[in-house]
Image (cartoon, rainbow, N blue to C red):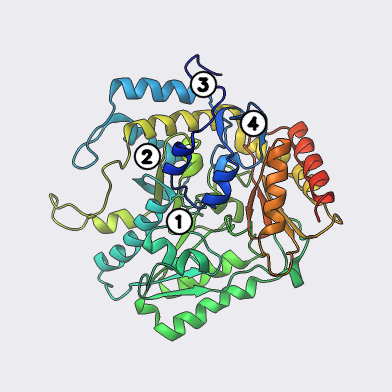
């Protein structure tokens, strides 16, 4: 749906290209051969040179209901014309209460939502809430945080500290004190070509006992993990692993936080990963699909009792000294409400679940193609892991990315892993198209 004012083509000037310092991008390489989207509709982007590209990644794992949905566009228009902004502190507006109410109704057991403006901000919020919670409960020594190798929790200092991605950490100094990391669970020797959850690896959760023994539980606030690690290559938890983490946290009074920025809002065929794995963390971080990627927004769900612990002080006190100018922004809330309505009306989580078997077959049809050393899938997410060229640990997948883009498919790569996470409105013919094209590209790789 293009308006008359939206550009159908775009040729950036050199000055325009150079002025923009692009995030998580090889700037020099990009600017020599830019890739630019000018519009999008449902499953497709249109490029600046007028080509259609099938969206195999829901943007950055966020456009779960497909692009430029008129209901969301209209809700944003109306909101910005009615109430463009309301102060986030000591004031409210209808949308923020309505969205919080709808969210808690989606997740029994969680009774309050704290809003932020991105996944990273929601992560920082959850980590701070965890430490503050123990303090208001009279356990102020519980300050240590535990993350996991290959975990991605955004780019705030808290997030990169609990995160386990070496390149994202190494330029940024000493980071937060008091952080430990569990081992990641990725193991090709035991689990290559598993379908859905791998069998091997639940025992890796027991490393948490070792960390607790080292520091004493009375010093530990929280463990944070992505139920399915997305950005580092779709690492699916071994059967029983998350249950084991939950048991150990319970045993020691440690809060468990799930970062569901990717898994939230239907990616696994259930509303949230907590439902898919039947493990209830104490906090759930969401973003991305919350507004279908249209307006930045993140949120933290807290389990019953956490909010109440903060309500014990004098009535007029401000209980949690944390928040953002744009927390619960009216336009983001309007986008969120319209997005949730689409998910409900179209049964998109159910649709994802129904297509997941077809998706699984398509993913594993790539087995045996050159350089493919693993295939992983769950719900509507998947990874294709390629054998690296010695000394060039990202080259093969990136070449694949470039060739797919040229031929009309958007994929995402991390190291030599290709990640796929299409909008949940995907249909079988798109899946056929995606994997047909991927197979051709893989066959043609050096
Ligand atoms: N946590 C996870 C699990 C993520 O995947 C991401 C983004 N990919 C973030 C946090 C950070 O979100 P944002 O980029 O919106 O800050």
Q: CA distance from mark 4 to mark 2?
A: 29 Å
Q: CA distance from mark 3 to mark 4?
A: 14 Å
Q: Is residue 271 visible?
A: no
Q: Please, what secondary structure does the residue beneath circle 2 have?
A: helix
Q: Please, what secondary structure does the residue beneath circle 4 have?
A: loop
Q: Which residue is mark 2?
A: 100
Q: Which residue is mark 3?
A: 70
Identified at 24% across, 65% down, the residue is: 136
Q: Which residue is mark 4?
A: 43
The mark nearer the N terminus, 4 or 1, is: 4
Q: Quadrant of residue 305?
A: bottom left
Q: Label 4: how many residues lie within 10 Å, few (<14), some (14-19) or many (20+)?
A: many
Identified at 66% across, 28% down, the residue is: 51
The mark nearer the N terminus, 4 or 2, is: 4
Spot occupied by residue 139 in the image (x, y as percentages of width and height): 28, 73
Q: Residue furthest right?
A: 368
Spot occupied by residue 53 in the image (x, y as percentages of width and height): 66, 33
* Residue contact at pointers 1 and 2, CB within 8 angstroms: no
Q: Please, what secondary structure does the residue beneath circle 1 have?
A: loop
Cβ of mark 1 under 8 A from ligand 1: yes
Q: Label 2: how many residues lie within 10 Å, few (<14), some (14-19) or many (20+)?
A: many
Say which of 446 and 190 sits in front.
Answer: 446
Spot occupied by residue 183 in the image (x, y as percentages of width and height): 57, 74
Spot occupied by residue 248 in the image (x, y as percentages of width and height): 50, 73
Q: Which residue is mark 1?
A: 154
Q: Residue furthest bottom?
A: 214
Closer to the eye: label 2 or 3 = 3
Closer to the eye: label 1 or 2 = 1
């Amino acid at each position: 749906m293009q308006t008359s004012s939206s550009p159908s083509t775009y040729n950036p000037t050199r000055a325009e290209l150079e002025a923009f310092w692009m995030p998580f991008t090889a700037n020099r390489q990009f600017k020599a051969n830019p890739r630019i989207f000018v519009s999008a509709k449902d499953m497709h982007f249109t490029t600046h040179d007028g080509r259609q590209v099938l969206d195999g990644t829901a943007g950055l794992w966020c456009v779960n209901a497909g692009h430029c949905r008129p209901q969301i566009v209209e809700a944003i228009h109306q909101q910005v014309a009615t109430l463009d902004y309301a102060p986030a502190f000591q004031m409210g507006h209808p949308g923020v209460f309505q969205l919080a109410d709808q969210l808690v109704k989606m997740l029994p057991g969680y009774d309050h939502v704290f809003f932020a403006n991105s996944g990273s901000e929601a992560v920082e919020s959850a980590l701070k809430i965890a430490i503050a919670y123990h303090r208001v409960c009279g356990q102020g020594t519980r300050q240590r945080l535990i993350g996991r190798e290959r975990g991605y929790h955004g780019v705030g200092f808290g997030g990169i500290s609990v995160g386990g991605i070496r390149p994202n950490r190494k330029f940024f100094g000493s980071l937060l004190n008091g952080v430990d990391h569990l081992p990641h669970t990725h193991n090709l020797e035991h689990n290559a070509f598993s379908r859905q959850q791998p069998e091997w690896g639940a025992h890796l959760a027991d490393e948490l006992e070792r960390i607790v023994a080292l520091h004493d539980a009375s010093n530990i606030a929280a463990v944070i993990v992505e139920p399915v690690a997305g950005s580092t290559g779709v690492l699916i938890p071994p059967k029983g692993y998350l249950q084991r983490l939950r048991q150990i946290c319970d045993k020691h009074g440690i809060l468990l936080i799930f970062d569901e920025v990717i898994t939230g809002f239907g990616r696994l065929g259930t509303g949230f990963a907590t439902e898919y794995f039947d493990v209830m963390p104490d906090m759930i971080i969401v973003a991305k699909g919350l507004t279908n990627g249209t307006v930045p927004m993140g949120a933290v769900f807290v389990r019953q009792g956490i909010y109440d612990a903060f309500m014990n002080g004098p009535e007029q006190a401000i209980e949690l000294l944390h928040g953002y100018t744009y927390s619960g922004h009216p336009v983001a809330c309007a986008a969120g409400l319209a997005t949730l309505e689409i998910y409900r009306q179209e049964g998109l989580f159910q649709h994802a679940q129904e297509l997941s078997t077809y998706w699984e077959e398509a993913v594993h049809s790539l087995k045996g193609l050159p350089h493919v050393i693993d295939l992983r899938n769950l719900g509507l997410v998947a990874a294709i892991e390629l054998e690296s060229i010695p000394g060039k640990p990202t080259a093969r997948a990136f070449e694949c990315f470039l060739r797919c883009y040229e031929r009309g498919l958007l994929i995402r790569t991390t190291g030599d892993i290709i990640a796929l996470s299409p909008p949940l409105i995907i249909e079988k013919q798109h899946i056929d198209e995606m994997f047909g094209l991927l197979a051709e590209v893989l066959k043609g790789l050096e």
